[in-house]
Amino acid sequence: MPLDTPGDYGPPIEAEPLGEDDAEDLLRGICFKTGPPRTVGVELEWLIHDREHPDVAVPPERLRAAADAVRAVPLDAALTFEPGGQLELSSRPAGSLMACVDTTTADLALVRATLGRAGLAPVGLGVDPWQPPRRLLEEPRYAAMEAAFDRSGDSGRAMMCTSASVQVCLDAGEEEPGPLGYGRRWQLGHLLGAVLVAAFANSPFRQGRRTGWRSTRQALWTDLDPDRSLAPRTGRPPRDAWAAHVLDTPVMCIRSDGDVPWAVPEKLTFRDWIRTGAPRPPVRGDLEYHVTTLFPPVRPRGHLELRMIDAQSGDDGWLVPLAVTTALFDDPEAAETVYRTVKPLAETAGHAAAPRNPLWTTAARDGLSDPELASAAAACFTAALEALPRIGASRHVMDTVAAFTDRYVDRGRCPGDDLPHPAEAGGVPVHGKGRGR
């Protein structure tokens, strides 16, 4: 049985061809669903390592057996496995931060116990510090994705098969302007992104070597095809900007029925595909799939999906980016404070699109050792700590964020600074609180 069992990604045989106006209307209608922010979700990716020998690749058949065991567990979250065998838990939208924390904590306890019985552990690191890319999923979409990424180097394979993240999902926001308006929240995601990269950088190693980046995962994203990984150009209303970005980005692949290999065209934008109708007319399902192949740091999917945070080590490491980001976006006072803090910093760095803006490069390379990012992070975490009681955070969540702030933010450090070199005895901690936690 494969690690993952994806849904039906083949095109419907009798689907209606999609027109350009219909595509634009569809994108504008689904990208930002507005209303008062009420729900929050989190997507947690984990590398899977042997508990006793984390530097040794887990054999595929052992990973498949573990995947089957985890699938049999009654989880609240959706469970998937990524191309390299990484496990992903995607929570359902929750009505509050604590509802999301409680259900995800319960799911993780079940997953850890199940993997533990197989001698495995879920590991929170942005990039595997030992293993080269190894694709375990053989579905046509992954073969097509690999072929498309290979055109621009090996970073795509590394991203697919050896990276992991914490993705925070928040409501798009209100229709009206203001700290909770969707336009401001869309902008805030891009302004705040570099601070989140720096504060949670947790991937300084790759294939047994120090890379020179605090967040090697972010460096991999920066090295990918810019059409697919950059933020949409600013200066236009968010709905228009995103719709244009989607239609003017090249198609990664064209789906086929059954096990037929998917075509991997070069420089065929979705707009051009609609206009030419070749090699076949696109349908709505093709547009919906095309959106999933775009990887900007903030992706609008009705809600906002923040994608720039490395996976975090330790049992509770993931709580911190979830709690901090939710507080900074959903508490009006914190949102206004942070917007005023990060906007001048981002503007000073120039107007290149994230993640190729120089500020994002500095964040990925230097983490919070950069004085300006350290100062901005200190202000953001202070605002978050003040806001957490107002959004109903538990004492445990507040204490966990406070401990992270004291250990890292207040000292100009990030989690990756705690990780030992993979060549050291004992290597990188793989479970629990780990070394220095």
Image: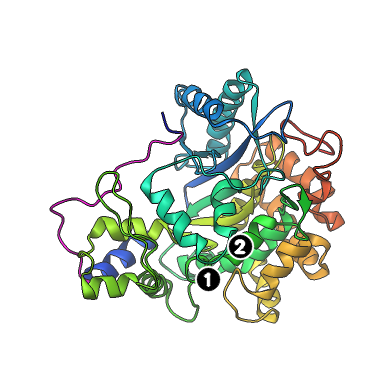
* Amino acid type, residue under disc 2 in the picture: Ala
Between the C-alphas of marks 2 and 1, the distance is: 29 Å
Image mark for residue 335: 2
Is residue 37 or residue 142 the one in the foreground?
A: 142
Residue 225, image x, y percentages: 52, 68
Q: Quadrant of the N terminus?
A: top left
Determine which of the numbered discs, if any, sits on residue 226 in the image: 1
Whether 383 is drawn above or below 126: the answer is: below
The quarter of the picture where residue 420 lies is: top right
Neighbours of disc 1 within 10 Å: few (<14), some (14-19), many (20+): some
Image spot of residue 203 (x, y percent): 71, 51
| Left or right: residue 47 compared with residue 198 | left
Amino acid type of the residue that numbered disc 1 sits on in the rendered structure: Pro
Residue range highlighted in magenta: 3-20
Q: Is residue 13 magenta?
A: yes
| Crowd around label 2: few <14 · some 14–19 · many ≥20 (10 Å) | many
Q: At x 51% / y 51%, what residue is drawn?
A: 169
Using residue 169 as the reference point, say whether residue 122 is left or right of it. right
